[in-house]
Amino acid sequence: MCGRYVSVAERTDLIELYDATSAESSTASASYNVAPTQNVTAVIERLTSSDDDGVQRSLRLLKWGLVPFWANDPKVGSRMINARVETLAEKPAFRQAFAKRRTVLPANGYYEWAPEEIDGKIRKQPYYIHPAEDGVLSLAGLYELWADPSKDKDDPERWLRTVTIITTDATGPAGEIHDRTPLILPMERIDAWLDPQLTHPDKVRALLTGIELDPLAVRRVSTTVNNVRTNGPQLLEPVGDEADRPLQLALG
């Protein structure tokens, strides 16, 4: 799964990296401990005209935890922080978003926890996974719009925008840490993934297979990251004298 990640890239750098033409005035603050239910920065692309001849790519603020458009209660979003890639086109909660509302969430890295024996007890040890040469990872996601029935149609706060991160099987050494991993998209697939005019399930699904990633690295970090209220670059410091080690991860 993906339950925490790091997002500290500058807003201007993200606009350039993803060729965005606009950005909300309020984007998520830099965080070394992004957690579910928080607002996060996402890259989306939407049609800009009724005849479907133009799109606009932008940075938007979304709440992590997808609320389906048909949901009766937005609290359901806390249980939908991740979406399994294997069932995106079939599950009612994700089916329409998979076809029309795809996004990427920029991340400098993410955390996973592995069960380890520490002081005679089995505890979950956090690991930080990140690009070996720094940079930004593009986590594949889906976003959804939910209309609050208690608010007037012209109320600007009527719409709740939420997002989920897609996960897939973790292979090789990555699978020894956790059996699931966020699905990371290489830059050459971003344009097609964000394209709202690409709606055929088979063509969309093809974008999530055979992915070759740039080298990743992993390090053990302190369990202080377990507390969602803890933040700061100290969370990325390796435990003891352990250095980063290469991490091979093949997707699809």
Image: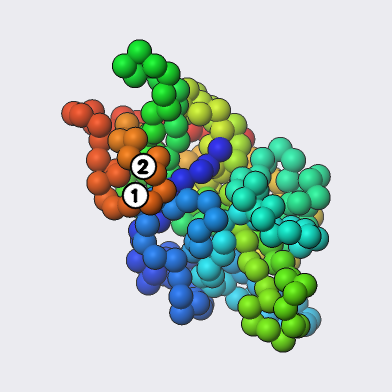
Residue 59 relative to residue 94: left or right: left
Q: Which mark is residue 17?
A: none
Residue 140 relative to residue 96: left or right: left
Residue 143: give x, y in percent of width and height. Answer: 65, 60
> Which picture quadrant has residue 131?
top left
Give the residue displayed 36% in from the left and 42% down from the top.
225
Q: Is residue 95 visible?
A: yes
Residue 234: give x, y in percent of width and height. Answer: 25, 46
Q: Is the residue 224 above or below the residue 145 in the image?
A: above
Residue 187: give x, y in percent of width and height. Answer: 50, 54
- In the rendered view of the protein, which quadrant contains the N terminus? top right
Residue 175: give x, y in percent of width and height. Answer: 51, 26
Give the residue displayed 56% in from the left and 43% down from the top.
183
Which is nearer the eye, 1 or 156? 156
User: Which residue in the rendered view is the most extreme toward the bottom?
Assistant: 154
Q: Is residue 192 visible?
A: no
Classify mark 2: helix, strand or loop.
Answer: helix
Residue at numbered disc 2: 225
Residue at numbered disc 1: 230
Which is nearer the eye, 96 or 39? 39
User: Which residue in the rendered view is the most extreme toward the left?
Assistant: 241
Q: Which three-letter amino acid code belongs to the residue tagged 2? A: Val
- In the rendered view of the protein, which quadrant contains the C terminus? top right
Give the residue displayed 67% in from the left and 41% down from the top.
85
User: Which residue in the rendered view is the most extreme toward the top?
Assistant: 120
